[in-house]
Amino acid sequence: MKRLMAKSKLILGIESSCDDSAAAVVQGVSGAATVRASVVEGQNSLHAAFGGVVPEIAARAHAERLDGCVSAALSQAGVTLKDIDAIAVTAGPGLIGGVMSGVMLAKGLSAGSGKPLIGVNHLAGHALTPRLTDAVTYPYLMLLVSGGHCQFLLVRSATEFSRLGGTIDDAPGEAFDKTARLLGLAQPGGPAVEAEALNGDATRFRLPRPLLDREGCDMSFSGLKTALLRARDSIIAEKGGITRQDRADLCAGFQAAVSDVLAEKSRRALAIYLAEKPARPVMAVAGGVAANSAIQAALETVAGKMGVQSIAPPLALCTDNAAMIAYAGLELFEAGQRDDFSLSPRPRWPLDTSRPAMLGSGKKGAKA
Ligand code: KG4
Ligand code: ZN
């Protein structure tokens, strides 16, 4: 049995595909690993004035900061590059300048140390996180919901993923952020909209539930924000402005619409997954939007009704980080993957190539 024979490995992970420069050290074997160190340097302050991530600014910041992140991660783990078994790096999908910074650094470290190089798909990093945090066994259902991603993945192994559906336009986090902007709330919009929604009446504005009338697990969130804009403008036209209560009701209506769409599409994705008769069915949810209590509760209810355990890894490992890249690298290393210096950064890299590519490409780069 491979698992019994596998020897504990120490993997360095590097992530730079969006607006977080990150490095981490993970130790263990596939399905039983621990995070020795995880360093994440965000760039929110660099991009705040521009209302979104500016790719050139992100790339330069990664180039300046990544080696510092690597040094910090190694020293926090109490190891040196000599102790590392392999260097795992995000090779896509994402903003290409940032991905290049990471891949170039990883190649340099690999060339200098002679340690093997492993290119990791950023989405695989997210998708395998429940194996790192909760030792979940294959196959499981994964819902990624963040500012950059929104997809259902049936995870069968570190290299086999079926995409059951995803957004055809905005990611839910983007829709939360745009909603906040339309209502004069602070960024990132998700937490601000959630706080307002607590005092709102979700039934006052009946916003659409896009694509629920269509079969399958694909989703759409861009029409919701247009509907919200219309609702806001009709109040302004009527009363000359919006009150606190109007704003709270709009937030509650918007959050309920996102929650209903995610819950119903999760129910469909779970039905497909359960048809495979997994021994211990699990649905894992990751990404910044998974922090939303109303959405979390709605998803737990759906999973519970279908006899499926729901898992949400701790937020620091749900949002972009390098521990997930190191862990995915560990599984790929055990599976025999080794990359050479021809490893190319990829702006797009769908996990499931049997499905047509997704069209969306939001403020945080390509969706897949
Ligand atoms: O995973 P994440 O930190 O970053 C990437 O997208 O890469 O997700 C950030 C997104 C933002 O759009 C933010 O508004 C959203 O997650 N978010 C939330 C909440 N907290 C963060 N959305 C809804 N409710 C929340 N409580
Ligand atoms: Zn991500």
Image (tube, rainbow, N blue to C red):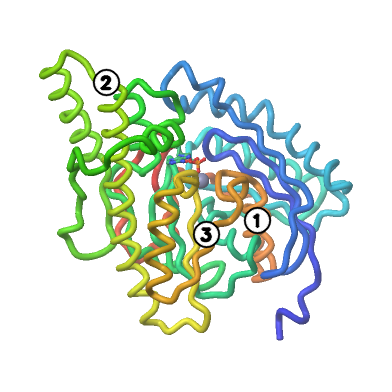
Left or right: where does residue 338 sit relative to residue 70?
Answer: left
The three-letter code of the residue at mark 3 reads: Ala
To which quarter of the image does residue 71 belong?
top right
Left or right: where does residue 55 sit relative to residue 339?
Answer: left
Instruction: Give the crowd class for mark 3: few <14, some 14-19, many >=20 residues within 10 Å.
Output: many
Circle 3/circle 1 CB separation < 8 Å = no
Residue 346 in view in this figure: no
Give the x, y percent position of residue 333: 68, 65
Residue under label 3: 127
Give the x, y percent position of residue 187: 45, 26
To which quarter of the image does residue 125 belong?
bottom right
Residue under label 2: 243
In front: mark 2 or mark 3? 2
Circle 2/circle 3 CB separation < 8 Å = no
Compute the Cα span from label 2 to label 1. 54 Å
Give the x, y percent position of residue 367: 39, 46
Residue beneath the point at 65% across and 54% down: 340
Q: Between disc 3 and disc 1, whose residue precedes?
A: 1
